[in-house]
Image: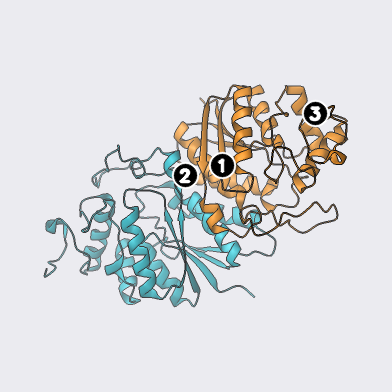
Chain colours: A cyan, B orange
């Protein structure tokens, strides 16, 4: 019988928070995996991960320190000398926040843990449409990685990758999250590290646009009130 | 034009040492990548990596600390509480030294560095026949991982995985290494961490059998003289 344990990759962001809520709604026993790759926002995202797990009752947790991704470098997320791009809606190039082959690294770690736990599933909140052109957010990539799992794990292992958000828009994710009671107020998406989200970086922009398009209010506190789609009452 | 830079995964062991010598013989500019995943033998293998790079003139080097693989656990190589299996030639099960999905994790890191270096190749000294049944040492696995690279990296990136040892026996590897003048005397294969190789673990046994079948003397010093195929003169 297929194991009902699912490793869920949880950055602490909105997408993976909704992804976790979906896995739980589908009846999986969640095991939350968070990666600290010494990105700018590591501490803030780690706090969000803990808060979201507490809220969703996810007891089994693993925070993996992946400092090697910083050593490998080449990305503005892990190199504080390169400024974070402010959002440019016309940009078609891959943004400077790109960490080379990040999802493959993340999935490889998650599969290793899933094999240790004898889990039958692995959830990742990747989104194809709103992924700002990251090549490792596309369906073809995940299909290839599934093959890599099938050929590279023990014969008795059967781990399926679930990407329940892959075809959703940010507005769909907001709606689905609210519908499932996901703790969006505890999630953190901003690429800057502060108490309030900046409201200006690519990631804040995508999130805010999602709430705007879904006609909902983002419960998170933002630095720049003009970025908010709705007044907050604070 | 394809980049002639090649990332070479170098554990410090015999296979990857011969693999590096092959890459250099094929005209690639080598960049040596070594992973310290806090296995029992990390310090000894790190020294071997440095010695082999010095000998082969490999200037560009990266040692990535991959402590997360220990945290993920579940393997005798990273958990000192589980004893290392002595070699059992009749064993068909996957040995306890198995690190779940290790080659996928290793390749994912190497691809990230290769993308940063704009390298065109990635060499790994995996051996199918003598791999003690590790599922991620097989040709199908590497073919699947190539697809993962092709779909998961930037469009302008073109990194080909080279597995020049995949179909070789340990005896073939010994012969090829000697032919190319690879520094086998500096390489380290033993799963125990000491000045002299134990001569008894799975890895020592495979190496010694390779030398025996090639009719060559292993230049490495062993603890247990009876394991040696030929007297050493020490």
The reply to whether residue A114 is visible in this rendering is: yes
Tell me residue B76's x, y (percent): 66, 56
- For this view, does B18 lie left or right of residue B30? right
Mark 3 or mark 1: whose residue is earlier in sequence:
1
Q: Secondary structure at mark 2?
A: helix
> Which mark's residue is nearer the viewer, 3 or 2?
2
Q: Which residue is mark 1?
A: B35
Pick the front one: A183 or B61: B61
Tell me residue B106's x, y (percent): 57, 45
Q: Residue at x 53, y 45 (%)?
A: B108
- Distance in Å between CA atoms under marks 3 and 2: 35 Å
Q: Would you say the residues marked 3 and 1 are in contact, meaning their CB atoms lie under 8 Å apart?
A: no
Pick the front one: B175 or A141: B175
For disc 3, the chain is B
- For this view, does A233 lie left or right of residue B58? left
Q: Which residue is mark 3?
A: B175
Name above or below for residue B126 compared with residue A177: above
Q: Which residue is mark 2?
A: A68
- Distance in Å between CA atoms under marks 3 and 1: 26 Å
- Distance in Å between CA atoms under marks 1 and 2: 9 Å
Q: Residue at x 50, y 74 (%)?
A: A28
Pick the front one: A112 or A175: A112
Judge if badges 1 and 2 mark residues of a common chain.
no
Pick the front one: A16 or A44: A44
């Amino acid at each position: 019988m297929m194991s009902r344990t699912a490793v869920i990759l949880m950055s602490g962001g909105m997408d993976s928070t909704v992804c976790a809520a979906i896995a739980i709604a589908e009846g999986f026993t969640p095991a939350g995996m968070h990666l600290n790759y010494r990105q700018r926002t590591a501490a803030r995202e780690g706090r969000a991960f803990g808060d979201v797990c507490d809220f969703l009752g996810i007891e089994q947790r693993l925070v993996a320190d992946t400092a090697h991704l910083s050593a490998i470098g080449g990305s503005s997320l892990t190199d504080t000398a390169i400024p974070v791009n402010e959002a440019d809606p016309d940009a078609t190039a891959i943004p400077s926040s790109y960490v080379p082959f990040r999802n493959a690294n993340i999935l490889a770690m998650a599969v290793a843990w899933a094999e240790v736990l004898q889990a039958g599933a692995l959830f990742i909140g990747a989104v194809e449409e709103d992924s700002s052109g990251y090549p490792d957010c596309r369906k073809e990539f995940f299909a290839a990685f599934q093959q890599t799992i099938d050929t590279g794990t023990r014969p008795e292992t059967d781990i399926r990758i679930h990407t329940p958000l892959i075809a959703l828009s940010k507005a769909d994710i907001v709606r689905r999250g609210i519908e499932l009671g996901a703790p969006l107020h505890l999630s953190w998406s901003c690429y800057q590290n502060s108490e309030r989200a900046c409201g200006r970086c690519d990631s804040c922009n995508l999130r805010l646009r999602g709430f705007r398009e879904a006609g909902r209010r983002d419960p998170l506190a933002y630095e720049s009130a003009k970025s908010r789609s709705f007044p907050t009452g604070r």
